């Protein structure tokens, strides 16, 4: 189980680090990591431990908590095992005066 948690930590740090730097994260990486989170739960890892570890990686990358960015009810929008990993919105500039 320790190897699985170590791999999850690496993936969370990779994803959140890229997003904090303004980069994008592939959907495949996110989806595979979410699958690993579900597998860890099925193998007996405590859900609270998984969420706490992910939140710790988020805070390390962004310098603030998931709650700071998405609100105290963030898990209502990202039910387990979804990862709140979203790139910044791209700047959009109008090309016409309309």
Image (tube, helix red, strand yellow):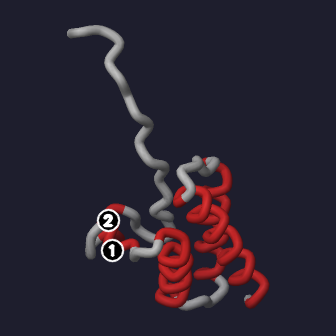
Q: Is residue 89 above or below residue 54?
A: above
The residue shown at (59%, 73%) is 38
- Left of 48 or right of it: where is 42? right
Q: Return the residue at label 2.
A: 70
Q: Secondary structure at mark 1?
A: helix
Q: Residue furthest right?
A: 3
Task: Give the camera-side residue of 81 and 22.
Answer: 22
Gap between marks 1 and 2 measured at Cα = 5 Å
Report helix, strand or loop for mark 2.
helix
What residue is disc 1 on?
Answer: 67
Q: Residue at x 32, y 72 (%)?
A: 68
**Which picture quadrant has residue 11?**
bottom right
Task: Classify 1 as above or below 16.
Answer: below
The quadrant of the image that shows the C terminus is top left
Residue 82 or residue 93, whichever sits in front = 93
Q: Is residue 47 above or below residue 71?
A: below
Residue 19 position, x and y percent, is 54, 56
């Amino acid at each position: 189980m320790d190897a699985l948690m170590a791999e999850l930590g690496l993936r969370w740090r990779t994803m959140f680090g890229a997003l904090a730097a303004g980069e994008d994260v592939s959907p495949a990486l996110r989806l595979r990591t979410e699958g690993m989170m579900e597998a860890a739960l099925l193998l007996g890892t405590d859900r609270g431990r998984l969420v706490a570890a992910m939140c710790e990686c988020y805070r390390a990358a962004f310098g603030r908590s998931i709650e700071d960015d998405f609100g105290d009810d963030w898990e209502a929008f990202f039910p387990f095992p979804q990862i709140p990993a979203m790139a910044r919105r791209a700047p959009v500039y109008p090309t016409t005066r309309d």
